[in-house]
Amino acid sequence: MDKVHPQSVLSRNLDYQEAFTCPICRHGQITGITLMDAFACNFCHHIFTANLVTQSVHVVDISQPMGWRWTGRSWQPLHQGNTDLTWLIWLVGVILVTFPPLLIGLTSYIFPTLGEDTWDFPLVWTSITFLLHLLLVLWLIAEHHQFPPYVSLKVRLGNRLSL
């Protein structure tokens, strides 16, 4: 009697007739679109083109060039050569997080408030400015890199708001 190796049962090739876990949201399933050489996710609704020879997919409905290679059991990200925009986003992020709170803190240091009832008013506004700008930059980075937990949360919130 032939024994089937457990790893060969789990390992499978990329095929338009089968469903695979979505490499972006990791919650939905990508399946082949009828009459097209493409996949679509039933959860995040992204569309992927596939190269069955190299066992890879590339997302086509967003501006960032993102791709993954199917290993037989899971997705492995393909490193894209276009990283020109990434360093610019990090630079803008550092400037947005540091410059406004620094400006508020420096202004409150140069022109201190008069009176004893200030209750650390400049420190509170500097902290609030820092936290709000940090949230803005974290959102910008999450939008650029399309992290799976962020995409999943965005899709779930979008589905709740559309009901």
Image (spheres, rainbow, N blue to C red):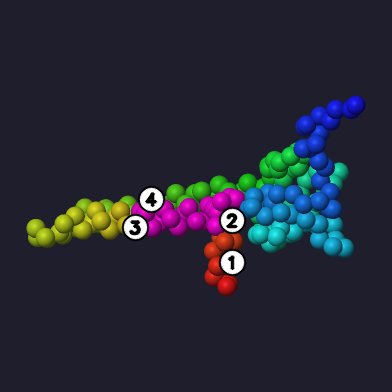
Can you see residue 66?
no
- Percent across and percent down for residue 11 are 79, 37
User: Label 2 to label 3, Cα distance in Å?
Assistant: 26 Å
Badges 3 and 4: C-beta atoms under 8 Å apart? no
Amino acid type at mark 2: Val
The residue where tag 1 is placed is 159
Amino acid type at mark 3: Thr
Q: Residue at x 81, y 29 (%)?
A: 5
Q: Residues within 10 Å of mark 1 (few under 14, many from 20)?
A: few
Left/right placement of residue 1 relative to residue 112 reads right
Q: Residues within 10 Å of mark 4 (few under 14, many from 20)?
A: some
User: Label 3 to label 4, Cα distance in Å?
Assistant: 10 Å
Q: Nearer the viewer, mark 4 or mark 1?
A: 1
User: Label 1 to label 2, Cα distance in Å?
Assistant: 12 Å
Element marked by disc 4: helix
- Percent across and percent down for residue 74 are 71, 41
The residue where tag 4 is placed is 98
Q: Which residues are magenta?
A: 129-153
